[in-house]
Image: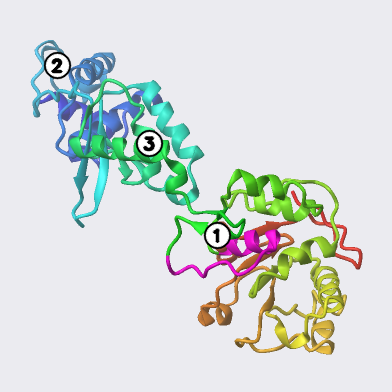
Amino acid sequence: MFIEDLIDRLACEGNYMFSSSLSISSNDFKLMSSFSTQIAHGRGLTEKQKNYAIKILKKYSSILSAEFGVDINPLLTNPAMKFPTRVIPQSRNITIEKDENSISYIIARFPYDKEIIDKIILHRRNSTALDRNEVNWDADNKYWKFALTEQNICFLSSWQNFQMDEKLLEYFKEIAAIQQQIENYVPMVTLDNNKKFIYKNVSKNIPTINSDNLIEVLLIARKYGVTCWSEEIDAELDKIINNTVKSFLRSNYSDKVINTKTPITFDEVEEIIRYYENILFIIPCGSELKYLKGTYENLISKNYKNESMAVLFRLAAAQDQLNCNKFIHDNSLNNPISDKTTLIFVSGKIPKPLIETNKKFDLVINFGTSSAHYTLQNFLKNHHNVVTMISTPPHKDWNYAYV
């Protein structure tokens, strides 16, 4: 009889899966179950685990002896193991390896180190939702697996006393060199010698700038993912009176909000809207008519046309006490989606007809996502240009505030 057999009996695993439970503490049962699972995967116990297991087995030796009809104490004095003692590697190394799909990952192997693990957990927490899913502990192989991204490479570059993959060291040097000359790599808006706005470090597919209006230039640049500009331009931006526009331009994509609590008017927001073609308005459930009516009236006052608008939600009869459906009908907002439809209203979810059009939105105005469907939550999470507002209803004065 092996020590592993005794562990399986206490845990009611392996050959004893259908045996009756023995009277042991819940903590001991959990630990024995953990050891048993490890054994079932063909992995031996470490020296420390073996000693701890024997200590617990001695605690229940009388119960086990009665169960097997033989004194097990001699076995505990001279333990026989089914699997060889597993030795935990003491090496600390970081390598780049390919998985079964030939996708390269960064693999970090090291003996248990709480300080390093806490750093990894904090790194995950501070990462974007997409990157957060690319840092994982592989319990079977006992290593940490990182996606081969710049963010993860920069994080790992600070680790001390690790043997590093040569290719990874090359990446460290390349990133450090770029950081020292960041102005030659980051897409940005700057000024040429004639004080004209130009793009720098951008794809050749981005249209050239044909405006001398600072706000227009920066808002259009943001549409193409360009959110940096020179210090000279930033100084000019400080002179702009419209604080809403300034806050929007300086907001981070991942924040998805304008960082000001100052009440604003529709005129201020319209100075953002006018430079974008396709705009999605998200109306919160429970306040559909208030938000829809307020936004519609303000858009009409700025000469936006009914035929460019479409409301893609309706309320059930029991919910439509304020006649939201009637308002949609009376103002011809039940238009089908076409190339002319540039202002679209949704509530609760992204409807299937909109998904099927594959329509791309330059800007999202989000009034709230109460009872939001996962399709809407994912859309907001991944969109690059989202303005989120507090719940003040958009009446004619549009006294919104961003949060």
In the image, residue 3 above or below residue 344? above
Asked whether, in this view, residue 29 is left or right of residue 254, the answer is left
**Residue span colored magenta:** 204-223
Q: What element carries label 2?
A: loop
- Label whose residue precedes the other's in the sequence (2 or 1): 2
Mark 3 vs 1: CB contact within 8 A: no
Tell me if mark 1 has few (under 14), some (14-19) or many (20+) residues whose alpha carbon lies within 10 angstroms of its own.
Answer: some
Q: What percent of the width, then of the height, locates residue 99?
A: 20, 50
- Label whose residue precedes the other's in the sequence (3 or 1): 3
Q: Residue at x 47, y 44 (%)?
A: 183
Q: Which residue is drawn at 77% across and 46% down?
A: 260
Q: What percent of the width, then of the height, locates residue 1?
A: 9, 26
Q: What residue type is labelled 2?
A: Asp
Q: Is residue 129 visible?
A: yes
Q: Is residue 367 magenta?
A: no
Tell me if mark 3 has few (under 14), some (14-19) or many (20+) residues whose alpha carbon lies within 10 angstroms of its own.
Answer: some
User: Foreground mark, 2 or 3?
Assistant: 3
Residue receiving disc 1: 198
- Label whose residue precedes the other's in the sequence (2 or 3): 2
Q: What residue type is labelled 3?
A: Cys
Q: Is mark 1 on a helix, strand or loop?
A: strand
Give residue 71's mark.
2
Q: In which quarter of the image is residue 231?
A: top right
Q: Which of 362 and 349 is in front in this view?
A: 362
